């Protein structure tokens, strides 16, 4: 047995064992569908706050705590495929909020549908903004079709709410125009920091629909018939119906 070296003060201490090098943290493993949903959610957030052409797959990977090859594993078509998947997710969720309740007066039902719509806008402001804001070089016929699908669903649900099976061109134009007003008001509400109370904005949009219907009714018998039916269902003491009758000078 070899003797340990000594000094005047005693044995020389043995050299300390080297500390193990820390391992590089690997990417957190998630189930396939959960990882895909995470990548889509991260992409929606990034696309909403920056133009899509300024968001790289590296940005998405970093924000999702993933690697670029992992992102490509789920979206082999690259950023364009991820962008379209993100838009489709937002579109499907928004369309599910268009349901109109079966109880209440027509204006109360429309207000309830708008409550569901604004609940989505508030909960998913990033996805909503990414869905509706155009002008990006990433926009394609497919991404435009996704947005058009949402608008067609809104048109179909609104006409169903009005009890209309086949809408003429003027009534269709009325509903499409009102949907555009709802979209514009929602984006402005987000841009302005949600300063306007959402219930006030909702009621204004309900009144906007009634006023637009009244203007269209002057030029379209079908809209006039639909509006008369809605006013009858509101009841003689309904506040909105009373205000509209006063404006129109009708009993």
Image (cartoon, helix red, strand yellow):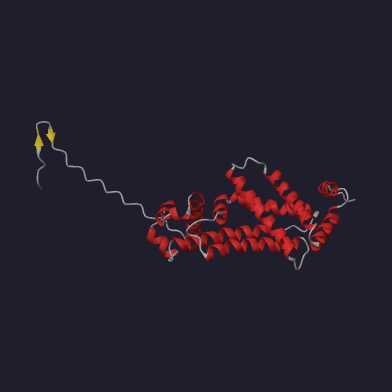
Answer with left or right where residue 227 lies relative to residue 10: right
Residue at 30% from the left image edge and 49% from the top image edge = 22
Name the residue nearer the viewer: 244 or 61: 244
> Residue sitting at 80 percent across and 58 percent down?
217
Hey, which residue is sitting farthest right in the picture?
A: 251
Residue 87 appears in view:
yes
Pick the front one: 13 or 191: 191
117 up-or-down from 222: above or below? above
224 horizontally vs 23: left or right:
right
Out of 146 and 42, give the one closest to the viewer.
Answer: 146
The image shows residue 3 at horizontal and vertical percentages of 9, 43
Asked if residue 7 is positioned above or below residue 183 in the image, the reply reads above
In which quadrant of the rendered view does residue 147 lie? bottom right
Tell which of 247 and 183 is nearer to you: 247
The residue most toward the front is 219
* Whole-percent x, y for residue 76 in the image: 43, 66
- List x then y, in percent, for residue 125: 57, 50
Q: Is residue 9 above or below residue 32?
A: above
Q: Which residue is drawn at 81% across and 60% down?
A: 226
Does residue 99 appear in this view?
no
């Amino acid at each position: 047995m070899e003797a340990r070296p000594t000094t005047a003060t005693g044995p020389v201490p043995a050299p300390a064992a080297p500390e193990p090098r820390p391992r590089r943290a690997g990417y957190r493993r998630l189930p396939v569908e959960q990882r895909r949903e995470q990548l889509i959610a991260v992409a929606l957030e990034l696309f909403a706050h920056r133009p899509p052409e300024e968001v790289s797959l590296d940005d998405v990977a970093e924000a999702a705590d993933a690697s670029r090859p992992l992102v490509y594993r789920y979206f082999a078509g690259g950023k364009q495929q991820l962008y379209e998947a993100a838009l489709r997710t937002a579109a499907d969720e928004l369309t599910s909020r268009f349901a109109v309740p079966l109880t209440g007066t027509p204006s109360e039902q429309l207000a309830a549908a708008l409550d569901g719509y604004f609940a989505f806008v508030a909960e998913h402001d990033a996805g909503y903004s990414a869905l509706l804001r155009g002008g990006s070089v990433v926009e394609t016929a497919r991404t435009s079709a996704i947005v058009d699908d949402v608008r067609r669903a809104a048109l179909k649900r609104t006409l169903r709410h009005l009890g209309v099976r086949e809408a003429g061109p003027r009534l269709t134009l009325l509903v499409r125009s009102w949907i555009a007003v709802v979209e514009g008001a929602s984006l402005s509400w987000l841009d302005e920091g949600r300063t306007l109370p959402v219930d006030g904005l909702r009621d204004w949009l309900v009144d906007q629909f009634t006023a637009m219907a009244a203007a269209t009714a002057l030029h379209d018998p079908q809209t006039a018939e639909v509006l008369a039916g809605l006013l009858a269902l509101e009841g003689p003491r309904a506040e909105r119906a009373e205000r509209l009758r006063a404006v129109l000078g009708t009993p």
